[in-house]
Every structure is written in C-alpha cells, then in structure tokens.
C-alpha cells in the first residue's frame, strides 16, 4: 500500500495542477438588441415610480384579501408549479451525478476464484485445482482532467440546473398572473350576470306594462313584440353569463389545484379595482432580472461549456486504475504477513483517427452555441415588446375608462328621458328600446374596460418580473 501511495501521489498532484486548463470560450453577456429606454409618446404611459417590479412582492401588489388567499392557495397546490419544483430536484441530482466524475470512485472488494485444469492441459501432466482469495480497495478508470473535459461537463450540468431553477421562477410568476386574471374575469362575468339579470327584470316589467296597454288598446302589437324581443335578449344574456361564470369558476379551481370555496368568490370588480403602483424601471435592469432571460443566459453558458468539452476531445486523456489489498491461495493465509498485493495501471489515449467524429462534435457544439445566442436575443426582444405593449395599453386605458363612464352616464340619462316621454305619450316605445339597448351595451362595455385596465396592471407586473419573493438563482 505504501508503494502504491508513492506511485499515485505525484500523478494526483499533477492532475490538480493541470486542472486549471480550460478550453471553453470565455462567456460574456451579449449586448441587448433593444433600445436603452422604453418607447415614449402619446400612446404610452409614464414609467411610474422608481424601483423594480421584481422587488414588489405579490402580497403588496394585490390589495384584495380574497385574491391574496387564492394566490397563496395556488402556490401551495398547483400541479404545474409542483412539477417545476420536482424538475429542479431532478436537475440538481443530475448535476450531482456529473460532479461525481471529477473524483475517483473508490470501492472495496473481496472475491474467491477456483480453477480446475485437466491432466491433458496441465504442465505437470496431472490434474490440478487452484484457489485464490482476494480482498482490497481501489479505483478504476479515473480520468485526470488535464484539459477540462470533465470540468466543462460538470459546468454544463450546473448551468442546466440553474436554468431549471429560473424556469420554476417563470412558472411561479406566470401562475400568480393567471390566478389574478382568472379571478378578475370571474368578477367581471359576475357583474355582467347581475347586469343582465337586472336588465331582464326591468324589461320583463316593461313588457308586462306594454301587454296590459295592448290589451286595453293603448299600445300596438308592434310595441308588444318589440318589448318581447328585449326580454328574450336579456334572458339569453342571463343564460350566457351564467354559463361563463361556471366556466370561470372551473378554470380558477384548476389553477388553484384545490376545490374553490364560496367565500373566495369575488363580488365584483370594485374590491380589486385598486392595485399597487408598478415601478417600471429601465430596460437594462428589467431584462436582467426577468427569469426567462436569466434562463436563456444559463443555457448560453451551458453551450459554452459544451464547446470546452468538445475541444478537450482532441487532446490526450489520462486514466488511472489502481488497487491494493491482500491475496492468498488459502483463506487462512489471506491476512498474514507477505500476502500484500497491489496493481497500478495508468493509461494515456491519444486520438489519431476517428473519421471526423471529434471535429463534427465540436462543430455541433459551436452551432448549438450560436442557436442558443439567437434564442437569448429573441427572448430579450420578446420581453422588451411585452413591456412596451403593456405600457402602450396602460397609456390609453385610463382615458378610455373615463370616456366610457361618461358614455354610460349619458346613455342612462337618455334612457330615463325617453321613458318619461313614452309614458307621457310624446314618443313611441321604439325610442325607449333604442335608448335601453344603448345603455345596456355601454354598461357592458364599461365592465370590459374596467377589466382590461386591471388585467393590464397585472400583465405589466408580470412582464416586469414581479411576483417572485424568493432569492434568485445565480452561478
């Protein structure tokens, strides 16, 4: 064992000294292929408060207590998020497997072998039986990483783990946004259902009045049929929005991953009409902190590491196999003096001809790096557009909401005046129906605009990287 240690130590020291060699290209963050500032103009909103949306926790962004409870439930029970977390565990295990290749695997073994040689094959002309007992420890085919092949493969696995962790952050942020949007959609459809039910009740009362007047000869059959059309239209809307509310509840329950309780259902859009102000920041900071961009960066670093491993295949590889222990022909003499045995087998392999395999592997790794770089730049450009679109929508939604509210007020006043003139006999019922339809459509559009405004705030919060309250993964 002492002689084995004497032979092995210099080689291990040499391996440690040579481990600093690395043939992977230097990794530098590419310049972002987007402008240094967000778009500006009459269609765009101001950038808001200073800071970063990534620093604004979702508990502080959402004001409505029911919505906060739903998000908490989804983060606990949602199956997509659970799968993303398990994928991190798998990536971590794969990284540990790859990391183990940097160290020798030492095994202890004991064995027994017996062999009988017939007389015709024995050198002595007599049949013989030999036995051998062995026990020892050692390692086999341990590669001295002279040119960084193993280390770059380990780096590739590490970056894959980091990329998976960033993917989980993306799922986390997207889930919060999806739960909020599903909740807002449900709240808006419940308001639409109440409006349709209220309109149906009003139109049914008006229809009853018109029918009585028709029976008395004070109204025409045309007025009666027109009133009936409004009742039937309102009844159809009640059925349609009843179905949509049920579907919204099913969608929200799927996101939660748990049954939806009655106390979690929204009463309307009013309780969630107030959301915290979202700080927009500058593109350079926002794009660096978005998890999908960080995921693309880690994939790019993994591609560089693959190039280093492919380059190392052109150079010699050194492997060591060594073992030490005891051996004897009888079990009783196995641990007596003089039974020591050892073996040491260094091996150097120099590639000479491989039919172009190593060169093709390197070319494939370089092309993969270029593909990953293009995907990174595409991710940056896509992220920039998402933020720009959200800012463009936010810039006009406030004005659109004010105009729509004014339209609802005017339509309601017009309907009130038309109804008064009809009851006084100054106008036909057609004018009342037209005013009622205009008011109902304006009220439905107002709900849609309010919903769009809230969804835009949630979308802006999401595309700016908000909603993650845990530490970012970094190398």
Image (spheres, rainbow, N blue to C red):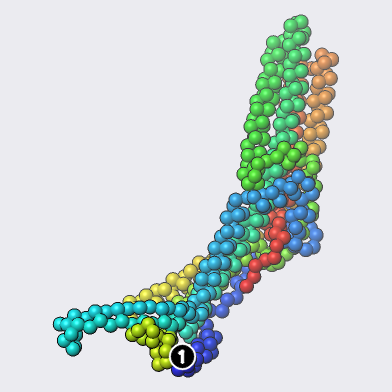
Frontmost residue, 255 versus 460: 255
Task: Locate residue 461, reporting x and y percent.
Answer: 72, 55
Frontmost residue, 89 versus 254: 89
Circle 1 Cα neighbour tier, 10 Å, few/some/many (<14 / 14–19 / ≥20): some
Horizontal arrangement in the rendering, residue 180 relative to residue 25 (left or right): right
Task: Locate residue 46, reporting x and y percent.
Answer: 77, 57
Answer above or below: position of 26 versus 75. below
Residue shown at the point (79%, 53%) measured from the top left: 276
Horizontal arrangement in the rendering, residue 426 relative to residue 458 (left or right): right
Answer above or below: position of 436 versus 276. above
Residue shown at the point (48%, 79%) measured from the top left: 106
Frontmost residue, 355 versus 452: 355
Residue 352 appears in the rendering:
no
Task: Locate residue 60, reporting x and y percent.
Answer: 78, 55
Image quarter of residue 337: bottom left
Element carrying mark 1: loop
Give the residue number, with chain letter if any, for mark 1. Answer: 1
Horizontal arrangement in the rendering, residue 42 relative to residue 112 (left or right): right
Give the quadrant of the C terminus.
bottom right
Residue 173 appears in the rendering:
yes
Image quarter of residue 173: bottom right
Task: Locate residue 296, reporting x and y percent.
Answer: 58, 65
Residue shown at the point (79%, 34%) measured from the top left: 408
Answer above or below: position of 475 versus 456. below
Image quarter of residue 235: top right
Residue shown at the point (51%, 80%) measured from the top left: 103
Frontmost residue, 444 versus 68: 68
Spot the residue most to the front: 332
Q: How many marks?
A: 1
């Amino acid at each position: 064992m002492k002689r084995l240690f004497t032979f092995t130590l210099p080689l291990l020291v040499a391996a440690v000294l040579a481990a600093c060699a690395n043939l992977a290209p230097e990794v530098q963050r590419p310049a972002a292929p987007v402008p240094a500032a967000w778009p500006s103009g009459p269609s765009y909103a101001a950038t808001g408060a200073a800071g970063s949306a990534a620093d604004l926790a979702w508990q502080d962004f959402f004001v409505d207590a029911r919505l906060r409870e739903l998000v908490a439930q989804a983060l606990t029970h949602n199956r997509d998020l659970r799968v993303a977390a398990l994928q991190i565990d798998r990536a971590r295990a794969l990284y540990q497997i790859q990391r183990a290749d940097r160290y020798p695997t030492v095994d202890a073994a004991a064995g027994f072998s017996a062999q009988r040689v017939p007389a015709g094959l024995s050198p002595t002309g007599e049949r013989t039986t030999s036995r051998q007992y062995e026990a020892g420890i050692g390692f086999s085919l341990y590669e001295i990483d002279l040119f960084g092949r193993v280390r770059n493969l380990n780096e590739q696995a590490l970056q894959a783990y980091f990329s998976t962790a960033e993917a989980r952050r993306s799922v986390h942020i997207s889930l919060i946004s999806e739960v909020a949007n599903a909740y807002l959609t449900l709240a808006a459809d419940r308001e639409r259902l109440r409006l349709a039910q209220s309109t149906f009740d009003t139109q049914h009362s008006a229809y009853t009045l018109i029918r009585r007047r028709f029976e008395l000869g004070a109204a025409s059959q045309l007025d009666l049929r027109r009133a009936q059309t409004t009742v039937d239209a309102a009844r159809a809307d009640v059925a349609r929005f009843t179905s949509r509310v049920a579907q919204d509840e099913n969608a929200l329950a799927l996101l939660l991953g748990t049954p939806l309780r009655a106390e979690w259902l929204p009463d309307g859009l009013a309780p969630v009409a107030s959301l915290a102000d979202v700080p927009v920041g500058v593109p350079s900071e926002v794009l660096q902190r978005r998890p999908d961009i960080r995921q693309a960066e880690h994939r790019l670093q993994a591609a560089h590491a693959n190039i280093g491993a492919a380059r190392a295949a052109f150079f010699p590889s050194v492997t060591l196999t060594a073992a030490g222990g005891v051996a004897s022909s009888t079990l009783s003499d196995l641990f007596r003096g003089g039974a020591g045995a050892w073996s040491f087998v260094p091996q150097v392999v120099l590639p000479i001809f491989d039919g172009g395999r190593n060169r093709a592997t390197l070319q494939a790794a370089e092309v993969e790096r270029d593909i990953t770089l293009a995907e990174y730049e595409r991710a940056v450009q896509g992220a920039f557009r998402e933020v720009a679109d959200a800012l463009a929508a936010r810039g006009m939604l406030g004005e659109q909401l004010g105009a729509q509210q004014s339209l609802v007020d005017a339509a309601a006043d017009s309907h009130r005046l038309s109804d008064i003139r009809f009851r006084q006999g100054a106008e036909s019922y057609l004018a009342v129906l037209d005013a009622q339809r205009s008011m109902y459509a304006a009220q439905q559009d107002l709900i849609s605009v309010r919903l769009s405004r809230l969804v835009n705030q949630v979308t802006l919060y999401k595309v700016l990287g908000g909603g993650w309250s845990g530490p970012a993964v970094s190398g």
